[in-house]
Amino acid sequence: MPARNKQGYALAGVDIGTASKIKKNIARQARGTFQPGVLNFGSFGSMFQPRGYEQPVLVSSVDGVGTKLKIAALLGQNNTIGIDIVNHCVNDILCCGASPLFFLDYIAMAKLLPQQIEDIVSGIVHACKEVNCSLVGGETAEMPGIYLPEIYDLVGFIIGVVEKRNIIDGSSIAPVDIVLGLPSSGLHTNGYSLVRRVFGIDDNPKVLNKFYPRLGKTLGEELLVPHRCYYRELEPVLPLVKGLAHITGGGFQGNITRILPRGLAARVDRGSWDIPPIFKLIQQQGNIDSEEMHRVFNMGIGMAVVCSPNKAGKITAVLPQARAIGEIVRAKK
């Protein structure tokens, strides 16, 4: 009877030893983000005890970075993609008035590459420290046959907290309220599938190295600019705010409408701010009409702030980059 070849997990493409070393390194980096509320780390579940709240309401969100991940992987520059996922999640819960407490990540790829994962986690740790958020756990998954070599997926999970009386839910928004816009840092984490198609990046990744004078950098450098976090700048003015809308996929129409009471709409003046060069380049290169551009991209405004007219001046005094971009009106029947 012929001898059978021995089989093992490593031969199937999964290296448990490498995974164990990677997890120990992640734990080392994560400890630098811990707050007093972290009760444990490394068990089957992470524990966190919120402190200093009378009626704490937990606010949660989960999101991914989309195909911006592919740009990072193609360029071998993975140290900012972790910043993207943390800042995106922080901005989402900020729209409810919440402060971040703790964060978890999910990283999956065909073969775990220690340096690639270390770069990703370094970005996560950096962004968590910026907003005093603890990285308390996560998952690294090696999945041969599912992902292409060196291409990975990254998902973030965040939990924040807000006093019940301080929840921002848009319920007090009324006609004639002002819509202020805070600038984005570029595409943030939306529209990258369209960008890849417009520039033919999948067929010719070398286009990422092309320098564009109007951008002042290469296309790849522009596309990897991290998603801007608005928590620190908005935190001091939250008591003056009626509603916040994180402008992500769906643009103004798809996001501002999420916070408006029934019967109201937002009238946005598209000529009230300067559209950054990257959006104009994408539109020209892809021959994309204006409506589609505003539906897919943030077009230079990453966060919309709704406030009463008599509070707008106080907010812009603290946030000089904020500018009036529209107003709240009654919706047409």
Image (cartoon, rainbow, N blue to C red):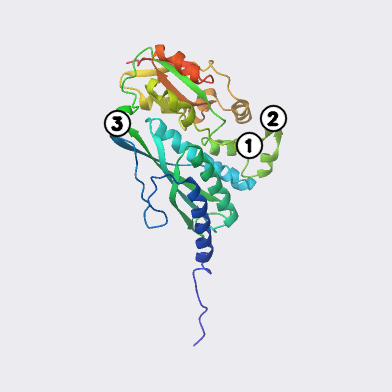
Residue at 39 percent of width and 53 percent of height: 40
Image coords of residue 162 (percent x, y): 34, 33
Image coords of residue 114 (percent x, y): 57, 57
| Of residues 254 and 17, the one drawn nearer to the viewer in this rendering | 17
Residue at 55 percent of width and 52 percent of height: 117
Circle nearer the N terminus (3, 2): 3
Residue 65 seen: no
* SS category of the residue bearing label 1: helix
Residue 91 as seen in the image, left or right of residue 264: right
State if disc 2 and disc 3 touch (CB < 8 Å): no
Image coords of residue 326 (percent x, y): 45, 16
Q: Residues within 10 Å of mark 3 (few under 14, many from 20)?
A: some
The residue at the far bottom in this view is 1
Q: Which residue is mark 2?
A: 216
Q: Which residue is mark 1?
A: 199
Amino acid type of the residue that numbered disc 2 sits on in the rendered structure: Gly
Residue at 65 percent of width and 44 percent of height: 205
Compared to 113, does 321 lie above or below?
above
Image coords of residue 183 (percent x, y): 53, 25
State if disc 1 and disc 2 touch (CB < 8 Å): no
* SS category of the residue bearing label 3: helix
Amino acid type of the residue that numbered disc 3 sits on in the rendered structure: Lys
Q: Quadrant of the C terminus?
A: top left
Q: Nearer the viewer, mark 2 or mark 1?
A: 2
Q: Quadrant of residue 311?
A: top left
- Residue 164: numbered disc: 3
Amino acid type of the residue that numbered disc 1 sits on in the rendered structure: Phe
Q: Nearer the viewer, mark 3 or mark 2?
A: 3
Circle nearer the N terminus (3, 1): 3
